[in-house]
């Protein structure tokens, strides 16, 4: 089966067919290219999806991902990111192993096809030229034969005419001979050209065209084989990443199996345990005592002497209440001179009841969240340094975490001090390498930082020891902060007794209104004490003019240079200072910040 013998007369159709084959190959290349674009797009979307649901660094959301279910979700996102990477590998392999190779092969195929059909057209032109020569020789031979025949007839006519001279007859005879000779020459020439044409035609149809068509057939078959190999490669590229994709899916399954509901429940306990004890029984309040006092002068003493034996729950219980139980009036902090003996154990007498106006005033003063300092106005409130606004257990955890952070900073500063000391020793031994005195300032600065950090650590360790060692009976400062915590978290349950104990059981509402006002005034003054200004950690240049109309903001003019005292915490605001008295927040996008290197390291 050969195109040269079977399709010897289908030159034009073969030319169209081979062009169609190249078009099919280019169409397949385009298909693979679009597949690679889809793989890249899919991988990009998977990566964006994984990134979208990743917890943000240094945010509250990141702290919530300590549970095993959340960790499994993070592992799921990471495996999905690796899964997207495999689709990128598919795209890269298809581009390098299929698209590039086939594109180069198509160019070679076009050149080979062009060369083969050029040879075919050249052979066609040659045989057509031979055919034209044969036709020309044939017509000349035919013409010469006719002229020779006419010359012979003319000679015979002249020879038969008696009126024609002998010279004319001789001339006609010579002319007839010439024409006969020309006819013979044309015949010989025609015969020679015919033989040559027959030979060329035989070579054309049995040698040249079969060879050319055979090359075209082999070229077309190679194209078909190459396309099949590309399809196999297309499948192999997908098959190569299947094991890795399987590992990604196995990782997701393993992460799902690692979820431990008991561990998550324990983490919830550690995160939200307050350290308070459950509330005790609620006391019976005997409101019949005023009625008994009207019957007898000794009724008050009798009621106190007889009320306790008769009533099983007439005495005050020292059990603690839940911190979230709603009190009609939050208990004020006890005065400095208060003692446990000042707390009455009997029913409340009519003289000790508050007037309605003072009752409402005290309820207003104690139910509103207090402002720790003016800085809390600038960012929606600030946490006390000793975390006294937190329940005992949570406060202990926060203090322990702070102590650990300070210890790490101290270790870092000590390592830096050791490095500077070694460098100074090197400078002392080799003065040409540097001046030892140039490191004294840095060494002193590091030592000063270590001392500050140690003082800060001792302060937090003292608070931690107070929480761990004095949790059942806290100091007056802790009691005051407990009252502040109650006022910052408004209760939600109504209609409870007015003289319930506070969460720590350290005071009740049996204290006088005068003591309440004194302590409130003391708390208010303490909370607005001046704080030391924050040190500058860099400078910034205002890119645009900003009118600070809201509380806590500061106005800046374009081109103005100011000091940065607190960098952006992720909310889009940077805290700056113009001088000692003017400081506030500006949008981070309005300034160009340049932080000091030491501030960045710390």
Image (spheres, rainbow, N blue to C red):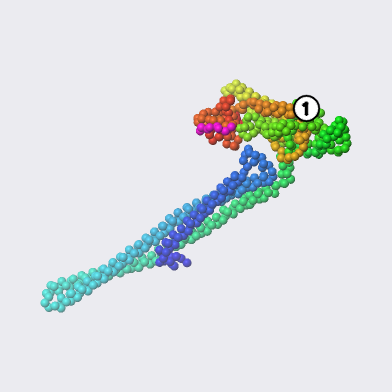
- Report if residue 493 is visible in the image: yes
Query: Is residue 598 magenta-colored?
Result: no
Task: Name the residue located 66 percent from the left edge and 49 percent from the top edge.
Answer: 252
Task: Name the residue located 62 percent from the left edge and 50 percent from the top edge.
Answer: 244
Span of residues in magenta = 544-551
Task: Name the residue located 24 percent from the left edge and 72 percent from the top edge.
Answer: 145
- Report if residue 304 is visible in the image: no
Tell me which secondary structure the magenta stretch mostly adopts: loop
Name the spot of residue 206 as percent of width and height, x first. 40, 66
Image quadrant occupied by the C terminus: top right
Q: Nearer the viewer, residue 401 or 143?
A: 401
Query: Is residue 546 magenta-colored?
Result: yes
Left or right of 567 on screen, residue 401: right
Q: Nearer the viewer, residue 291 or 221?
A: 291
Q: Nearer the viewer, residue 124 or 489?
A: 489
Name the spot of residue 164 as percent of width and height, x first. 12, 75
Q: Secondary structure at mark 1?
A: loop
Name the spot of residue 34 as percent of width and height, x first. 51, 53
What residue is shown with label 1? 338
Question: Quadrant of residue 158 in the image?
Answer: bottom left
């Amino acid at each position: 089966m050969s195109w040269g013998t079977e399709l010897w007369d289908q030159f034009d159709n073969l030319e169209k067919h081979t062009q169609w084959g190249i078009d099919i190959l280019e169409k397949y290349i385009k298909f693979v290219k679009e597949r690679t674009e889809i793989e890249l797009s899919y991988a990009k979307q998977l990566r964006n999806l994984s990134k979208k649901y990743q917890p943000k660094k240094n945010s509250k959301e990141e702290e919530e991902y300590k549970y095993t279910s959340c960790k499994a979700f993070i592992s799921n996102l990471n495996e999905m990111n690796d899964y997207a990477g495999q689709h990128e590998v598919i795209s890269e392999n298809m581009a390098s192993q299929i698209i590039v190779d086939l594109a180069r092969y198509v160019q070679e195929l076009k050149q080979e096809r062009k060369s083969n059909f050029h040879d075919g057209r050249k052979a066609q032109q040659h045989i057509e030229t031979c055919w034209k020569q044969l036709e020309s020789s044939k017509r000349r031979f035919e013409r010469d034969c006719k002229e020779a025949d006419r010359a012979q007839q003319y000679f015979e006519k002249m020879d038969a005419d008696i009126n024609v001279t002998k010279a004319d007859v001789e001339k006609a005879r010579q002319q007839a001979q010439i024409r006969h000779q020309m006819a013979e020459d044309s015949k010989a020439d025609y015969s020679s050209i015919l033989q040559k044409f027959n030979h060329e035609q035989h070579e054309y149809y049995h040698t040249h065209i079969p060879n050319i068509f055979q090359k075209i057939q082999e070229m077309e078959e190679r194209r078909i084989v190459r396309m099949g190999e590309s399809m196999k490669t297309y499948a192999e590229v997908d098959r190569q990443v299947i094991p890795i994709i399987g590992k990604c899916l196995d990782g997701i399954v393993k992460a799902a199996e690692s979820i431990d509901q008991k561990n998550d429940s324990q983490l919830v306990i550690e995160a939200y345990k307050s350290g308070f004890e459950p509330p005790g029984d609620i006391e019976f309040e005997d409101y019949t005592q005023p009625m008994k006092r009207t019957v007898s002068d000794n009724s008050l003493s009798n009621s106190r002497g007889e009320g306790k034996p008769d009533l099983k729950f007439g005495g005050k219980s020292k059990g603690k209440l839940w911190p979230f139980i709603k009190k009609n009036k939050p208990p004020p902090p006890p005065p400095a001179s208060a003692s446990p003996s000042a707390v009455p154990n009997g029913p409340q007498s009519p003289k000790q009841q508050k007037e309605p106006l003072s009752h409402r005033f005290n309820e207003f003063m104690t139910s509103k969240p207090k402002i720790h300092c003016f800085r809390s106005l600038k960012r929606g409130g600030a946490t006390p340094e000793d975390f006294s606004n937190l329940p005992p257990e949570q406060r202990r955890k926060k203090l322990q975490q702070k102590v650990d952070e300070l210890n790490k900073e101290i270790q870092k500063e000590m390592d830096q001090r050791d490095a500077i000391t070694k460098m100074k020793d090197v400078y002392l031994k080799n003065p040409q390498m540097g001046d030892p005195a140039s490191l004294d300032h840095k060494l002193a600065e590091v030592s000063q930082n270590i001392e500050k950090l140690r003082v800060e650590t001792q302060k937090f360790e003292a608070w931690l020891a107070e929480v761990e060692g004095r949790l059942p009976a806290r100091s007056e400062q802790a009691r005051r902060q407990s009252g502040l915590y109650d006022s910052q978290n408004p209760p939600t349950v109504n209609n409870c007794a007015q003289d319930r104990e506070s969460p720590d059981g350290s005071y009740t509402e049996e204290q006088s209104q005068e003591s309440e006002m004194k302590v409130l005034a003391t708390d208010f003054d303490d909370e607005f004490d001046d704080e030391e200004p924050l040190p500058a950690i860099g400078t910034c240049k205002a890119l645009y003019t900003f009118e600070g109309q809201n509380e806590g903001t500061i106005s800046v003019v374009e081109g103005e240079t100011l000091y940065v005292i607190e960098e952006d915490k992720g909310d889009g605001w940077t805290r700056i200072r113009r001088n000692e008295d003017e400081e506030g927040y500006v949008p981070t996008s309005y300034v160009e910040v340049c932080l000091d290197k030491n501030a960045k390291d710390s």
